Image: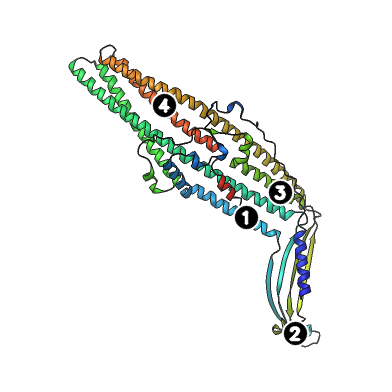
Amino acid sequence: MRSNNLRWSTVATLSIALGGCSLAPDYHRPESPVAVQWGDTSPQTTDTAAVDADALNWQAFILDPQLRRLVAAALDNNRSLRQALLDIDAARAQYRIQRADRVPSLNATASGNRQRLPGDLSTTNNPQVNSTYQVGLGISEFELDLFGRVRNLSDAALEQYLATAEATRGTQIALVAEVTQAYLTRDGAQRRLALTRQTLETRMASLELITQRRKAGTATALDFQEALGLTEQARADLESTDRQLRQAGHALQLLIGTQDAASDLPTTPQDALLLVQDIAPGTSSSLIERRPDILASEHRLRARNADIGAARAAFFPRLSLTGSVGSSSKALSGLFDGGSNAWTFAPSLSLPIFAGGRNRAGLDLAKVRKDSAVANYEGTIQSAFREVADNLAATDTLRREEVARRALADSSQEALKLAKARYEGGVDTHLRYLDAQRSAFNDQSTLIVVSTERQIALTNLFKSLGGGWRADAAENRNY
């Protein structure tokens, strides 16, 4: 019995060891279709406090504690992210299923059979009852992976799992960016709402003054209508801004995924900085190593490369093993007596001769899919490079525009004070004063819009650089 077990163990060990050959092409990462450096798309700034994107996670990028709490709540409750995480579990399970084909499946078996033969069928011409009982361990149709077919299928499943994990990491980063942008949009709407309310109060007071002067005969009907028009314009702007504020709050609540999210939203605009104000992009090569969609595309390319190996192996013989070792006896009581040892060993060889061109077509399909994956990989890099370049240009120009808009708003506010003093002193007409009011309000409102756009551009830059999830990326590889 011991010698049979040793013989069977040796066969199983050899069958596993034989699966070392692979017909998959050697993988080489395609050359990057973009420049090594960002060139003139990098921001023209000498600020030495810029944070390296490779070391910047979302907790460090977001400076506002309340916004960090909202992002954390969204990561725990967002339904789209939850579905993406379940996709990872499904891909991991699929890989484990495929990987299981690389080792033999050992099954415990037990069977019994009793059969009565009539006299005219037995050798003694007398009726007989035959009994057979068996117990043992068996392997059923285990493929000796001589040419790496099973191994390449397993490798392809692994790469698909890793691609799904990277795609989910991209979903996480996108969710962080979406929550941040919704928060910034709401904050900008709050600032414009506060400005519009203040402007409406000022214009209502001005309208009251014009009304009194009209009654006294020192103001014309045109003065009254112009003041009334500005007041109603401010009232309309107030309702429009209030609508935008409410809609931004609804969008933020949907992203967070909880009904009580509104209780955590600030009721007044924030004075402190909400985000890191300068990000160093690094080189384009670091982007390839960091951005989730690029990494996912490369994993899919590796999977297609492994598929070629499996398709090539289909042209070669396929050797499978079926066997068992155990005990067999005519009587159930003698099943474990000495001399009842039994074993079976049934290898089978399948050699493809004619399949109607199926194998050739399968190999051609695998090669075309790999070429398509290469094109997708290169296109993903090009799209990522453009996104980063666009966002670098946006943050750079919006920074300078914000400085200019702030100076313009300050100038308009000072001009308004002078126009008011000249009007009240009788030096200028009411029309000049109204024009100053319009300019001051428009310039301040535009400053708020540009400031919000710059913060959103910083968020887009953070997202396009693929920052924010280094720790979880490492955890996703613990397959």
Distance (Cα) linking label 1 and label 4: 53 Å
Q: Which is more foreground, mark 3 or mark 2?
A: 3
SS at mark 4? helix
Q: Which is more foreground, mark 1 or mark 4?
A: 4
Q: Looking at the image, is mark 1 or mark 4 earlier in the sequence? A: 1
**Picture quadrant of residue 436:** top left
Mark number, residue 94: 1
Mark number, residue 447: 4
Residue receiving disc 2: 118
Residue 380 seen by the camera: no
Residue at the image point whose x is 38% and y is 22% from the top? 410
Give the amino acid type for the residue marked by disc 2 in the picture: Pro
Give the amino acid type for the residue marked by disc 1 in the picture: Gln
Distance (Cα) linking label 3 and label 2: 58 Å
Rendered location of residue 229, percent (x, y): 30, 23
Residue receiving disc 3: 306
Task: Tell which of 371 and 412 is nearer to you.
Answer: 412
